[in-house]
Amino acid sequence: MSNISSNTNLQAYRASVLHFQQDPAFHEQAYAWHEDGLLIVDGGKIVAAGEYAQLHASLPEGAEVIDYRGKLIVPGFIDTHIHYPQTDMIASPAPGLLPWLETYTFPTERQFADINHSAQVAHFFIDELLRCGTTTAMVYCTVHPESVEAFFAESEARNLRMVAGKVLMDRNCPEFLRDTAEGGIRDSETLIKKWHKRGRQLYAITPRFAPTSSDAQMQLAGELAQAYPDTFLQTHVAENTDEVAWVKSLYPKARSYLDVYDQYGMLRPRAMYGHCIWLDDADRARMAETQSAVAMCPTSNLFLGSGLFNFERADAQQVSLSLATDVGGGTSFSMLRTMNEAYKMARLGGTYLPALRMFYLATLGGARSMQLEGTIGNFVKDAEADFIVLDPQATPLLARRTGHTESLDELLFALALLGDDRTVAATYAAGKLVHQRQAGHK
């Protein structure tokens, strides 16, 4: 390790260190686990991660070592599907997806024409993400360009790696939330040119879902996605049986709901599809073939009664999977609580989901799904230093359970099933401390 810089700004963090190189579902040697580990950071990038005994002697004189022994350092969580404008309507009662949209979602989103309101919500929303250990998210804004400007301004001020986009929606929605086919695309292109790859910000072309975009808007969105191939694309598909039936009535010639997007050129790398519950094997094969990815949203799916994601069929087709909260359909910003729901959803569907895989899906799985491996998601050299510190003693019950775990999988399982925002002792983005849990908050 003689190549470590003598820069005295270099920082090192001593704790147990865990990160992934592969999906544990398909590889035996999928992760690196250093029980007494050291993570070395310089200039917002990872220098090295390994055993303390091997790395500490290589540190330059004067290098700061922050002692988190007794805690676990993992890459920052990556939430691949979340709606920041729905922060204020989280936990709103409704008998299903479509009435929930009409009663709560659309009226709440109306307020985001006001950039000051957008900025205030964006500030709280990002605070909440960091408190829960989420350092990267794929974020839906509203139809209003002001909502995107406010979000990116807040994220840029904190130097976070975020992806966001203006919702495209020109039919089957209230007039007060309706853009136009051409106007929505024009606004999106303006935002792409301003924000995509500006610092750590990335843009996602964001048709809300097929029923709320006209043929003309879908066509133009697909063309925009082809014109800017390094942008992201995010939307919803096959979340709910009523929604699937609605899409069938709107697009009777399409083979499936997913096929609607395919016909408009929207299946491609960096395309993230929320939910994907009511797909068939032909759909899954097409997603794998095009490197389109799934954002699984278990908390939201259970809350809205949408259905159970089929892990077995997705894995058989080797579809790229990631984990997402889907706030405000999801009822928690915490990826730990989302793992809890994912585990139960998998069990109800006949699949056992080991804790190692849940942590993979929330870190490197998200990065791979977003085509950002090597940038975020693990601790390879020169990756961005986004990481979190998890406290196995954050609550009395968690401390009691983790006090006698006998394997890494047991420890991670306890964190996933019993953990929440209180488990996150600290959050770092680009090597800077951006959240620290106050002592005594249990």
Image: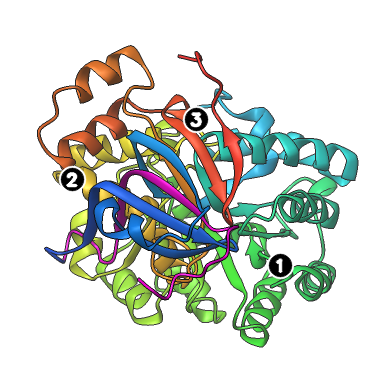
Compute the Cα span from label 1 to label 2: 36 Å
Q: Residue at x 34, y 58 (%)?
A: 57
Q: Magenta stretch: residue 17 in it? A: yes
Q: Nearer the viewer, mark 3 or mark 2?
A: 2
The N terminus - image quarter:
bottom left
- SS assignment at label 1: loop
Q: Residue at x 17, y 59 (%)?
A: 25
| Residue 79 visible from this viewpoint | no
Q: Residue at x 68, y 29 (%)?
A: 88
Q: Residue at x 23, y 16 (%)?
A: 400
Q: Amino acid at mark 3?
A: Thr
SS assignment for the magenta stretch, majority: loop
Q: Magenta stretch: residue 420 in it? A: no
Residue 43 in the image, given as x and y percentages of width and height: 60, 63
Give the mark nearer the N terminus: 1 vs 3.
Answer: 1
| Mark 3, residue position | 331
